[in-house]
Image (spheres, rainbow, N blue to C red):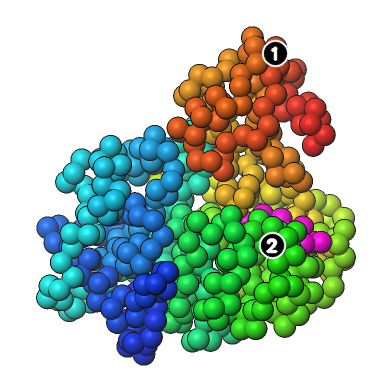
Amino acid sequence: MIKNIIEYFVETVNKNNNKIAVIEGEKIINFGELDRKAIILSQAIISDNDFYNQPIAVFLPKTIDSIISDIAITYSGNIYMNLDIKTPIERIKNIVNLINPKYIITNTSNLILINEVCPSEMIINIDEIDFDVFIDSQFIVNRLERLIDADPLCIINTSGSTGTPKGVVLNHKSFIDFTEWSLDTFNFSEQEIIGSLSPLVFDIYSFELCLLMAKGSTLLLIPDALAAFPIKILNLLEIHKTTFLFWVPTIMVNIANMDLLTSINLPTLKTVWFAGEVFPTKQFNYWRSNLPKVLFANLYGPIEITLDCTYFIVNRDVNDDEALPIGIPCKNTDILILNDNDQLIQNGEEGELCVRGTSLAMGYYNNPEKTREAFVQNPLNKSYPETIYRTGDVVALNDLGEIIFKGRKDSLVKHLGYRIELGEIEHVIVNTLKLAKNGCVVYNSSKKEITLFYEAMQEISLAFFRKEITTVLPKYMVPTVYIRMDELPRNTNGKIDRLQLKKTVNL
């Protein structure tokens, strides 16, 4: 029985000591060296204190060092939490103030920036670690004996309506379950080379890390700078004989629209997963027609249920004007589709997708109120405590019994693969920056546009808006369209009429 993710890694290192684990540009590291450096860093983390299950933040770009850091934190029996170095420092401060990590691991290049966030005694500079010191492997093994599968593995921050992201706590068991399901269902071999494109703060990256540890997969780190040059990404995949991709559809849509797959050869690519947002079927069909030997799968799920809870292996033709199903539940996960009366939907009805099972997150770190709102008692079970997660997503079943995504119940959206609470954008614009008297943000999923309606006496320039908002929010949360109004419409309760505003932009 696997108790924690590190048990996978120890076995993998014993079998693949000299195999390449990570490729970062011209740099490579094999499993033996990755393991050695992770253990040394873990010793540095716990050198002065004997603590467990404490959050430790990583403020590094996506590099070999960040992967060493995440594995080291896990080795130490603690919880890794990756921070995005491109996120405005005010947002980083909000996260750090909420989570209160024991340490923050960074490097010399980012030291000045992170010094604005926390005192120097909280900082571990990976550039100053002596990686030639003695390794007390038995000490680490003894610590891991105390680590069980119900203990937290990581914290992944997701958008929150008050301006402070929510820290979703995920444990070892949920990642082990998902990893075992993926190995059983997709038959990943020990020769997988993963084209790793997602940021460190994405759950997709955490799964890629699990595959590295559980199966000895090689992570090919795709540089952020290549995001604007999809053809260079494809060239990199071809050069390194990539076999597996797990991407958000945005980049895949761009590749399809630019017709790049006709000019590139990817003969080693075997499996492609996509998740995080709706993949337009026309562009998906472009991928499938150009890569006929590749197995494609559409995955669905919010981070609160550890990566994804349903999947659809595309094993039949789907018309361009037909939505791709999100499929059926993953193993050891149960899906409840409930109507407004908290009853299971009947044939032809739509309802909210709710999830039960060990894949559920442990809750939001230091946020019991939000945890109680989202993780609730199963209304179908009156006999004993049983938690379900209410996703807020509206779904239905097609004639084949597959789940079809219909939309959101509230203002939580996925944009460019990021999960965004529209209320957080409103809060920052109106309350934090005080740029407008009132504001309402709506999302146009077809155009992938965030639209801000705001109350002001006169027009505010787009340049000014964007300059101010990017001091607090990351670029992917900055509105695309700005519409000034003398007064925002209100409904009978006196609240801003979001539905009326959506009609204004034909949503």
* Residue 18 image position (x, y, % from top left): 34, 87
Q: Residue at coordinates 37% horizontally, 75% vertically from top-left?
A: 28
Q: Return the residue nearer the eye: 494 or 70.
A: 70
* Residue 5 image position (x, y, % from top left): 39, 72
- Does the stretch in magenta take in 112? no
Farthest top residue in view: 457
Q: Secondary structure at mark 2?
A: helix
Q: Based on the displayed image, in which of its 4 quarters is residue 119 positioned?
A: top left
Question: Measured along the vertical axis of the image, is residue 56 above or below residue 288?
Answer: above
Estimate the spatial distance between the alpha carbons at disc 1 and disc 2, rounded to whole Å: 42 Å
Q: Secondary structure at mark 1?
A: loop
Q: Residue at coordinates 50% horizontally, 46% vertically from top-left?
A: 158
Question: Measured along the vertical axis of the image, is residue 480 above or below residue 360?
Answer: above
Q: What residue does disc 2 label?
A: 255
Question: Measured along the vertical axis of the image, is residue 348 above or below residue 12?
Answer: above
Q: Residues within 10 Å of mark 1 (few under 14, many from 20)?
A: some
**Range shown magenta:** 276-284
Amino acid identity at mark 2: Ile
- Does the stretch in magenta take in 280? yes
Q: Based on the displayed image, in which of its 4 quarters is residue 216 positioned?
A: bottom left
* Residue 38 image position (x, y, % from top left): 27, 70
Q: What residue does disc 1 label?
A: 487
Q: Earlier in the sequence, mark 1 or mark 2?
A: 2
Amino acid identity at mark 1: Glu
Farthest bottom residue in view: 15
* Horizontal relation, residue 395 to residue 81: left or right: right
